[in-house]
């Protein structure tokens, strides 16, 4: 690797990624803490997002795992999409969002500056969840002289991570963890548990793992302590990069 990934955590699933001169924002959430209705349920945001839209500044693209849920795209996040040149998302999400949104099928590529962005499969819950939780995507970022970065999106499936690992040699994994749980599927995790995040890191062989989506919302059932414990138990503590909201790291 000849260049580093710089990552700044805003809160929840939202982080600014800077790689190869390209600036990308994951799942924009800027709304204040409080209740966020989704269908007949309410998701509760417990922490403010540190980065404002102005603090993020100009980005080349947004990497949006999905548009269906306010903990991944809230009201201010939707408004923010109108200011960016490109939003990469699922095909169904692009239809709903319109504007500069571009839908990518699994394994489809898009070029953003020096980066090749490849959409990769994700499953937002247990087997069969897609009919209820909707279409979700992850992304792999790569380019000449750059580390390969996997951004999982809201994926709960280690089996899908194995498929991704069979196609890419991943240097850095940005994993949406937190073991999100709601009334759906009898409380089964909708995102990676801490143990499965450690297993995913092992499967990928990633040198560094930066978790997102593990704090700031009430339905995240496992926070930083659980992540530390599971990565230590797996012998991967040296790979874990746990950021506080507002913290920036180069990995």
Image: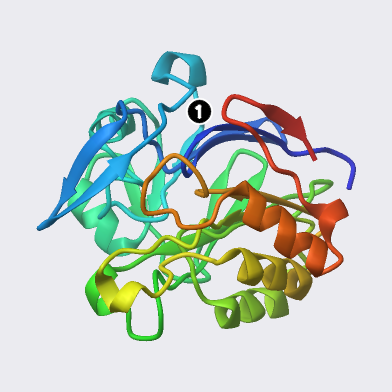
Relative to 200, is 214 on the left or the right? left
Q: Quadrant of residue 188?
A: bottom left
Q: Residue at x 40, y 26 (%)?
A: 48
Q: The residue tagged with tag 1: helix, strand or loop? A: loop
Nearer to me, 102 or 92:
92
Residue 210 vertical position relative to residue 10 in the rendered view, above or below? below
Count neighbours of disc 1 (C-alpha within 10 A) and say few if under 14, some if 14 to 19, many if 20 or more: some
Q: Residue at x 77, y 51 (%)?
A: 240
Q: Residue at x 53, y 56 (%)?
A: 222
Relative to 77, is 95 on the left or the right? left
The image's colour scheme reads rainbow
Quadrant in which the C terminus is drawn = top right
Residue 18 vertical position relative to residue 242 in the rendered view, above or below? above
Please identify the residue farthest to the top as the structure is shown: 54
Q: Position of residue 46 (x, y in %)?
A: 37, 36
Q: Position of residue 88 (x, y in %)?
A: 42, 49
Q: Position of residue 191 (x, y in %)?
A: 47, 64
Please identify the residue farthest to the left as the structure is shown: 40
Is residue 173 something that shows in the picture? no
Relative to 121, is 204 on the left or the right? right
Relative to 13, is 136 on the left or the right? left
Q: Residue at x 28, y 53 (%)?
A: 94
Q: Name the residue that disc number 1 marks.
A: 59
Residue 137 vertical position relative to residue 145 in the rendered view, above or below? below
Nearer to me, 51 or 180:
180
């Amino acid at each position: 690797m000849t260049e580093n990934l710089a990552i700044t955590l805003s809160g929840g699933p939202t982080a600014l990624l800077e790689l190869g001169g390209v600036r990308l924002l994951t799942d924009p959430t800027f709304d204040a803490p409080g209740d966020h209705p989704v269908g007949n349920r309410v998701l509760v945001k417990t922490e403010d997002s540190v980065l404002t839209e102005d603090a993020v500044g100009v980005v080349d693209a947004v990497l949006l795992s999905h548009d269906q849920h306010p903990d991944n795209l809230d009201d201010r996040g939707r408004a923010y999409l109108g200011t960016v040149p490109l939003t990469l998302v699922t095909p169904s999400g692009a239809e709903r969002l319109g504007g500069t949104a571009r839908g990518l099928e699994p394994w489809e590529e898009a070029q953003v500056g020096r980066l090749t962005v490849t959409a990769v499969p994700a499953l937002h819950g247990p087997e069969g969840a897609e009919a209820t939780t909707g279409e979700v995507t992850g992304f792999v970022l790569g380019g000449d002289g750059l580390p390969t970065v996997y951004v999982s999106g809201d994926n709960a499936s280690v089996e899908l991570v194995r498929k991704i690992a069979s196609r890419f040699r991943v240097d850095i994994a940005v994993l949406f963890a937190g073991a999100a749980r709601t009334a759906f599927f009898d409380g089964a995790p909708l995102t990676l548990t801490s143990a499965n995040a450690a297993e995913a890191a092992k499967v990928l062989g990633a040198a560094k793992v930066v978790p997102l989506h593990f704090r700031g919302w009430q339905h995240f059932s496992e926070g930083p302590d659980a992540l530390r414990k599971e990565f230590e138990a797996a012998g991967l503590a040296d790979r874990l990069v746990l950021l506080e909201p507002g913290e920036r790291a180069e990995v």
